[in-house]
Amino acid sequence: MKTEHEAAAIEELRELAGALRPLEAPGRVEQALREAFRRRQRRRRRIVVPLAAAAVIALAVLNLLPRPEGPRAEGAPPETIATDYMPVGFGRPLYPGEFVQVVRISVPRMEMVRFGLPVFEDGAEGRVQADVVLGEDGIARAIRFVQH
Amino acid sequence: MQAEELSDETLLRRALEGSEGCFAALYRRHQGRIYRFALAMSGSATVAEEATQEVFLGLLNGECKYDPSRGRPAGFLLGVARNLVLRHLSRSGRYAEMPEDLAGEAGEDISRRETIEAVRQAVLSLPENYREVVVMCDLEEMDYAGAAEVLQCPVGTIRSRLHRARDLLGRKLAPAARSSRA
């Protein structure tokens, strides 16, 4: 149940609400906020890009590390034995965050000799698989030999 | 889909992810209500402008974080504005300056302008806990549930405060109404 005063107040407030309704924040507020938004984006990019680069480098390093071999289950595919990655050629060093590709190729077994790896005479004629790390320019930077 | 068609939740998420379009759409959707709320609570266009800006800056800087379990983004934003205005009022007392926008056109009925100004002053003279429910429910036409979400209190509290606030306001305005009738 509304009192007389309450009913009168509602009426008066309706009038004030009508007068206030068209009011909005001045355009300069949106402009200032948009500028603040862009500044924030620039700051975030400055933080995110080095972090992303660091993450890529970390991943590359992890990929280059020899993986520990666990016990082999019965019926599991044969273990892969791989050498460490070894540098190839005199290409420029990889940039931080550079996207690398690893491709598996087949090379003459004698190629292993160039990297100081032993090759027994009876197997010298065959081929061996190798993982080659390519930089963004397509030039090989590292190689490892793989045997199943 | 245009940013203007997206829900507040989606706009807020995308804005924080870096979409300026979504940030602008969220701002445009809510700035009017936030500005008017701060203006009616403080009586100052300067405070209203600053509060509106601070609400959205707080979002950007991560100073105020939206928690979906505590209500909708609209209530959250108005709640942040309310805290800013109350903090301002507690620091510097009340403003009673006449906002330029409310000054009216030169040819506008003077008695109407006087009435509106009298009501505005009467609203400003209400205790803050009454004033805020009047501003939300009567001036901004929010429902009781929406106001309860902003104030984080039961709907019954809104109802009873509004009842008392209107009654008090009516009593304050009664002499002015009698003299204008005379």
Image (spheres, rainbow, N blue to C red):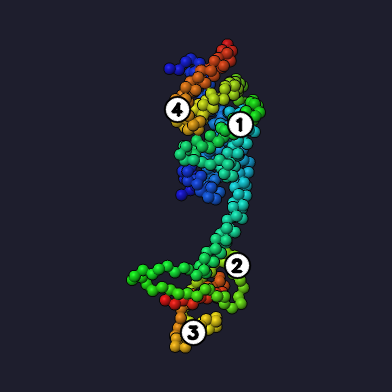
Q: Are marks 2 and 4 in contact (CB under 8 Å)?
A: no
Single out the mark in the foreground, 3 or 2: 3
The chain that hosts pointer 1 is: B
- Which of the 4 image quarters holds residue B181? top right
Please, what is the three-letter code of the amino acid marked with disc 4? Val
Single out the mark in the foreground, 2 or 4: 2
Q: Is residue B26 above or below residue B111?
A: below
| Of residues B41 and A110, the one drawn nearer to the viewer in this rendering | A110
Please, what is the three-letter code of the amino acid marked with disc 1? Arg
| Of residues A76 and B28, the one drawn nearer to the viewer in this rendering | A76
CA separation, marks 3 and 4?
A: 85 Å
Q: Which residue is mark 1?
A: B87
Single out the mark in the foreground, 1 or 3: 3
Please, what is the three-letter code of the amino acid marked with disc 3? Val
Q: Is residue A32 left or right of B142 when viewed as pictured?
A: right
Q: Which mark is residue A119?
A: 3
CA separation, marks 4 and 1?
A: 24 Å
Q: Which mark is residue B155?
A: 4
On the same chain: label 4 and label 1? Answer: yes
The residue positioned 51% from the left and 48% from the top of the image is B14
Q: Which residue is mark 2?
A: A95
- Expressed as whole percent of the image width and height from the top left, the position of residue A63 reads 50, 67
Please, what is the three-letter code of the amino acid marked with disc 2? Tyr
Q: Give the number of marks.
A: 4
